Amino acid sequence: MTQDTPQQPLTKLRAHLSQFVSISDEEWETISESFTVQNFEKDISLLGNGQACRSMFYLCSGITRSYAIDENGRDFTTCFHFNEPSSTVKNLFLTDFSSVIRNEPSQLHFQTLTEVQAVELPTQAISELYERGAKWEKLGRRLSEEAYYHTQQRAMSLLMKTAKQRYAELCEQMPHLIESIPEYYVASYLGITPQSLSRIKS
């Protein structure tokens, strides 16, 4: 996968944030000083693993998943994160918000499923940004609303739709995932076994 130059990911992040608030060149130069462009190989652990989350990542390219592990060692995919133009859903940020808010060990793990390029935003820097004034608090609110919306849609899909409907929804909203990641991750996300997924697809 071709990686962007260091400035391009920051430009992508600024463009995304500018959908919610206007950001001058001077403001961006100041707030982006603590942001770091990171390149990760496939199958790398990014956050979680029983530690409190101290960072948030904005994905520029590649795919990651968040997952939880039960007492029997089984893992369950809770979300896929990516920045893919062909997708009708954009899951651009990854962190464990519960861990950040409560400063507690994360119950989630984050794994790269492909090579990934991301911008790392320290949560301390984000908190300091919110204290700069109402505009930045508005930005935080809008980003939180987006995160809540995706979480609620995911929960309602699991509660109200059949596995077949969830798979059809996944194919419609995130077609690139079907071609890019192993089926057992897709099955885990849908809340079914790989065997059940094979029956749905047949």
Image (spheres, rainbow, N blue to C red):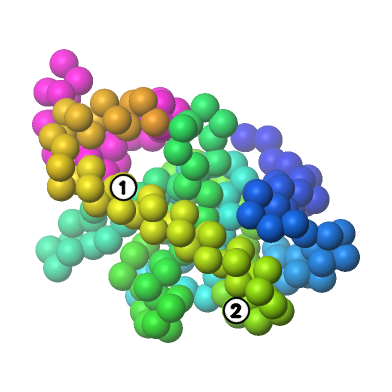
Q: Residue at x 48, y 63 (%)?
A: 144
Q: Amino acid at mark 2?
A: Ser
Q: List x then y, in percent, for residue 31.
A: 76, 69
Q: Is residue 170 magenta?
A: no
Q: Is residue 83 left or right of residue 152?
A: right
Question: What number of labels is visible?
Answer: 2
Q: List x then y, in percent, for residue 126.
A: 62, 73
| Magenta span of residues | 174-202
In the drawing, what numbered circle is on residue 37?
A: none
Q: Is residue 146 left or right of residue 160?
A: right
In the drawing, what numbered circle is on residue 127?
A: 2
Label 2: few (<14), some (14–19) or many (≥20) C-alpha neighbours in 10 Å: few
Figure check: 19 above or below 129? above
Q: Amino acid at mark 1?
A: Gln
Q: Quarter-wise, where is residue 74 in the image?
A: bottom left
Q: Which residue is mark 1?
A: 153
In primary-sequence order, the first of circles 2 and 1 is 2
Q: Is residue 191 magenta?
A: yes
Q: Main secondary structure of the magenta part?
A: helix
Q: Is residue 79 left or right of residue 190?
A: right
Q: Evaluate whether residue 77 shows in this view.
A: no
Q: Residue at x 53, y 49 (%)?
A: 92
Where, quadrant-wise, is the C terminus in this rendering? top left
Q: Residue at x 38, y 50 (%)?
A: 150
Report the front residue among 21 and 60: 21
Q: Quarter-wise, where is residue 194 in the image?
A: top left
Q: List x then y, in percent, for residue 171.
A: 34, 26
Q: Is residue 173 left or right of residue 128?
A: left
Question: Is disc 1 placed on a helix, strand or loop?
Answer: helix
